[in-house]
Amino acid sequence: MAARGYDDVVLAAPVTVPYVRYSTHGAHWFLGRAVAGLIAAAKIPKRQIDGLAVASFTLAPDTAVGLTQHLGLTLRWLDHVPMGGASGIVSIRRAARAVQGGDAEIVACVGGDTNHTDSFRRNTANFSQFAQDAVYPYGSGGPNTSFALLTAYYMRRHGATREDFGKLCVAQRTNALENPLALFKKPLTLADYLNARLVADPLRLFDCVMPCAGAEGFLVMRRGTAEKLGLPFARLLGAVERHNAFPADPIQDRGGWALDRDALYAQAGVGPDDIDFLETYDDYPVINVLQFEGLGFCPEGGGAEFIRANSFEVAGSFPFNTSGGQLSVGQAGAAGGHLGIVEAIRQLSGQTLGARVPDARHGLISGFGMINYDRGICSGAALLAAA
Amino acid sequence: MAQVVKRPKRKNPVERTRLPTLPPATRSRVALGLTAAAARGRFELQVCRDCGAVQYPPREVCRICLSQRLFWRRQDGMGELISDTTLHAAQELFFRERLPWRIGDVRLDSGVNVIAYVHHNVGAPPCRIRIEAALDRSGQAALVAMPERGRPALSDDPKLREMTCNPRARKILVTDGKSAVGQAVARALAAAGADLIWIGMAEPWKKSAGFDALRELPQAKVVPLDVTDSRSVRELAGEIGGKVDILVNTSDCHRAFSLAARRGVETAQLEMDVNYFGLLRLAQEFAPTLKARAADGDANAIAWVNVLSVFALSNYPPHGTYSASKAAAWSLSQNLRADLRPAGVRVINLFPGPVDDEWDQLEMPPKLSPAALAAALVQSLQGSVEDVYPGDVAQDWLARNLESPKTLERELGEFDR
Ligand SMILES: [Zn+2]
């Protein structure tokens, strides 16, 4: 049975709490600043927010419940979405159905984390039971180990090269140079990328996201509410999620998008050719390639050829990660699952901080999260359109 | 190819002795099943009794049919290395001090994936490999991808060597060299390349041909040690405790008596004094220095070996009091293991069946020769295990005990009076 459409659900008030490498603040500070940014952008009193979806790795011992009291919110709809890089997409899906059904009128979706000097190690050591039992004791490389294994496999199996992945990273850096909030301010050359310090063969320094602190947020509401508030918005045309797709694959060289893209494009009423820009979850470049393939921009295994045939800057043939993506902006924990959404709302509603994709009508955002053991478990995508 | 291991240079006494770092030791309770098997040198995975599915990482229920009826079954470990990486960055100090590390993703023929260390003799993926379970310095199971063919040792790989306690180039104390077992152990350690072997001698006035022959070993150095005398143990620890890398407790007092065969407690007390209190005295005097030297570069303290007895598992009435003393020693060795584990010093227990010596004279064959027991001991140091059951009788008792301790107790109680 096909899922019901999202009617007139819209996303508005894109907010970024500026990223910093390390912070002495707690996660509550970053999430609190994100909610403050949302009510400032929407010019509404705090009490008008009646729904909240939260994603964070460093909120413990609190969950969304603790945050609700911490921020003095009174809500009639609350969700905690601990799905890392897929949390933003999943929050959209949950929040959209809530406002569609009238369970809430304005849902704030926030994702963010702090980063103390030792918090990344602590988070990876206890990331999941399988990671603790069966991955972390083997060299404690964290996500670098997992993505090195996936990258090495993909390169061998499909003939992709370091230069292919480097082309994506260099283009993202070019995009980030226009974004005042990106932590990386220096241009990246292909030679810089290829000759950087080895981290986990074949991954080098610029293949790996830099953990930092920060938050992202946006509001989900009905079109009528946004118009009444005078808020620029982007329309939600479709959204999908999938968890633990293809468990029998010996190693992950495809994600859940392959199962869901047809439903997504059918729900949205547009196809891959109509997409003006793509925001992927990009903690490592290989995962971008699985998203190109899974979302139907090129065949499975055809990622390298697709990269060679396109350019990925904002003004390129395939505008991609237009704010710089996590690889050039920074990975503020669960904010990474919201970064692309916030950028897509900005692109489609005329509020860009950096370069704007000319005449963009349709933007596709995808999420990927939670390397629980040997592969990422959660995937999702959302298709947005300009008003 | 075996690498030449040389005895490191004498350490500058002014330098600070490094503190031990260890690989992460936290595991879920269900994952400890992997460690329990690895401690005996076996690679076991969870298998579902209802649908037969094999699974890894360990789970609380079957990943296919959700049955809770799971058991651990030995695996042949055959599979394919499908991807690998060499880590040049790590989050834990233990790994940072030893970078780089080769890690692989292995698809076992049983249909599950394991993340494993990769032995440096394994070629580039894709290639066939065999997974072995070892124990890391935290005493937790660590899976290692070994070449499918040939049987290279863990210690041939410079990184994986630390999972072993190879006696090569080590300084070792054998607490009693008077017994046939002690002598065989000393000779086997010498043959395995030990740098120096102190051999304890309790009753110097007693002559024994085998013991005198030990003096001919170039590595051997006879030292006075009576484990029933606290002062003797303390004095030896004061003299050599700071240099011992491996302590092998071969001290053993064995009198073949059952409860009903004799009045009085003197014999049992003697057994306890050597087998239990002897271990306690050794532990109190030597364990603190072993711990302090656990991270002392390549010349660090690495292991403690106890020669116990399979009679420790379940009382064998013809040797009733001896069984009890070995059971006590076994229990204390678990205390010692818990004490030494945070420093990364491994405690290895051997549980041999009847040994071909004077005290097991009336036992029926198969009996374990002292040389075979010594070979098993050296092998346990060269490998990566905690509990060793050498010989057919020990293996048989172990299997019966794992199946049903009560049945074994009843069977042993039916001995021929
Ligand atoms: Zn089952």
Image: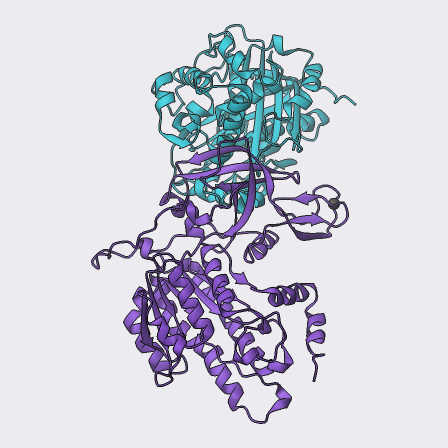
Q: Is residue B167 left or right of residue A309?
A: left
Which quarter shows the N terminus of chain B? top left
Give the image quadrant in which the ligand numbered 1 is located. top right
Residue nearest the viewer, comparing B272 with A289: B272
Classify residue B299 by image quadrant. bottom left
> Which chain appears purple?
B
Seen in the image, is A4 located left or right of residue A190?
Answer: right
Total count of labels: 0
Colouring scheme applied when the structure was drawn: by chain
Color of chain A here?
A: cyan
Give the residue displayed 59% in from the left and 33% down from the top: A53
Compared to B312, does B321 lie above or below?
below
Q: Nearer the viewer, residue B61 or A210?
A: B61
Q: Is residue B256 above or below residue B236?
A: below
Q: Position of residue B298 (x, y in %)?
A: 33, 53
Residue at the image point whose x is 62% and y is 90% from the top? B261
Tell me what residue is drawn at x 54 percent, y 73 percent. Answer: B356
Q: Residue furthest bottom?
A: B263
- Residue lying furthest top in this view? A359
Residue A228, visible in the rendered structure:
no
Is B314 rendered above or below residue A315? below
**Quarter of the image where one finds residue B410:** bottom right
Q: How far across and how far down the image is residue B366, in percent? A: 61, 69
Report x, y in % for residue A276: 56, 10
Residue B18 visible to the viewer: yes
Q: Position of residue B315 (x, y in %)?
A: 62, 77
Up/down of A328 relative to B40, above or below: above
Q: Quadrant of the C terminus of chain B?
A: bottom right
Residue toward you, B172 or A202: B172
